[in-house]
Amino acid sequence: MELKINQQIKKFNAETLSVQSLLDLEIPNKQNGIAVAVNSTIIPKLNWNSHFIQETDEILIISATQGG
């Protein structure tokens, strides 16, 4: 499966991926302070396990940062 994540094409050895599965592969140790949008729609954290990604989806993963 090829996915466009944060404007980059990435390949995965899976036919189906939930948002949570994708995050486990992409950022396994940091999932607090994360927002995920699929096709410009924010996916609530409660739905990460049940929202499945299609190969044509565009995914945006945003991490909160601190600073001033």
Image: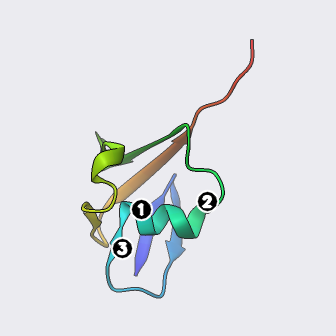
Q: Residue furthest top?
A: 68
Kindly indicate whether the residue at mark 2 contacts the one at mark 1 (C-beta within 8 angstroms). Answer: no
Q: Amino acid at mark 2?
A: Ile
Residue displayed at 59% across by 32% down: 64
Q: Is residue 31 left or right of residue 58?
A: right
54 displayed left or right of 23: left
Residue that badge 1 annotates: 20
Q: CA distance from mark 1 to mark 3?
A: 8 Å
**Could you tell me which secondary element the residue under label 1 belongs to?**
helix
Q: Earlier in the sequence, mark 3 or mark 2?
A: 3
**Marks 3,2: beta carbons within 8 A:** no
Colouring chosen for the image of the structure: rainbow
Query: How far apart are labels 1 and 2 at the CA level?
Result: 10 Å
Q: Report the front residue among 68 and 10.
A: 68
Helix, strand or loop under label 3: strand
Label 3: how many Cα within 10 Å (few below 14, some 14–19, many 20+): some
Please tell me in which quadrant of the rendered image residue 33 appears.
Answer: top right
Name the N-terminal-most of marks 1 and 2: 1
Q: Amino acid at mark 1?
A: Gln
Query: Residue 36: where, in percent of width, then height?
Result: 41, 46
Quadrant of the snapshot with the C terminus: top right
The residue labelled by disc 3 is 17
Q: Quadrant of the N terminus?
A: bottom left
Task: State how many labels appear.
Answer: 3
Label 1 or label 3, whichever lies nearer to me, is 1
Image side of residue 37 versus residue 24, left or right = left
What residue does disc 2 label? 27
The percent position of residue 12, horizontal first and vertical second, equals: 49, 81
Residue 44 placement (x, y as % from top left): 31, 42
As drawn, is 65 to the left or to the right of 10?
right
Give the CA distance from mark 3 to mark 2: 14 Å
